[in-house]
Amino acid sequence: MLVAGLEMLEDIGRAIALMLIFEGIMPFTAPNRWREMAKMLASVNERSMRLIGLFSMVIGLLLLWMWR
């Protein structure tokens, strides 16, 4: 039981590390474009932002389900 919990923590740590890598690619490679995108996102209404977030989570869950 303890081993399974440690494996899950390792998976979560890897997932967070991978997320940070992907999140850092844009500001590192194209900081001006990243800044423009951030300004554009500030003008998106709340409902659209929530739908984008929901869609992203569903796609992520489906990918995890396929790979497990």
Image: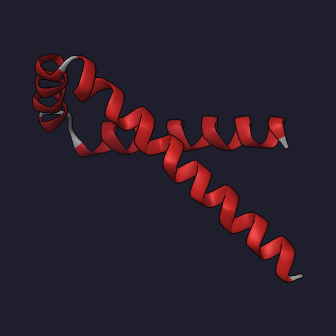
Question: In which quarter of the view is residue 43 placed?
Answer: top left
User: Left of 25 or right of it: where is 12?
Assistant: right
Report the front residue among 19 and 39. 19
User: Left of 12 or right of it: where is 29?
Assistant: left
Report the front residue among 51 and 2. 2
Give the vertical position of 49 relative to 15 (above or below). Answer: above
Q: Residue furthest right?
A: 1
User: Left of 21 or right of it: where is 46?
Assistant: left
User: Left of 32 or right of it: where is 12?
Assistant: right
**Number of on-image labels:** 0
Q: Residue at x 52, y 36 (%)?
A: 55
Q: Residue at x 48, y 43 (%)?
A: 19
Residue 23 in picture, x, y percent from top left = 37, 36
The colour style of the image is: secondary structure
Q: Quadrant of the N terminus?
A: bottom right
Q: Quadrant of the C terminus?
A: top right
Give the vertical position of 19 relative to 28 (above or below). Answer: below
Residue 20 in picture, x, y percent from top left = 41, 44
Q: Residue at x 25, y 26 (%)?
A: 28
Q: Residue furthest bottom?
A: 2
Question: In which quarter of the view is residue 64 placed?
Answer: top right
Question: In which quarter of the view is residue 57 placed?
Answer: top right
Residue 29 in picture, x, y percent from top left = 26, 18
Q: Residue at x 71, y 35 (%)?
A: 63
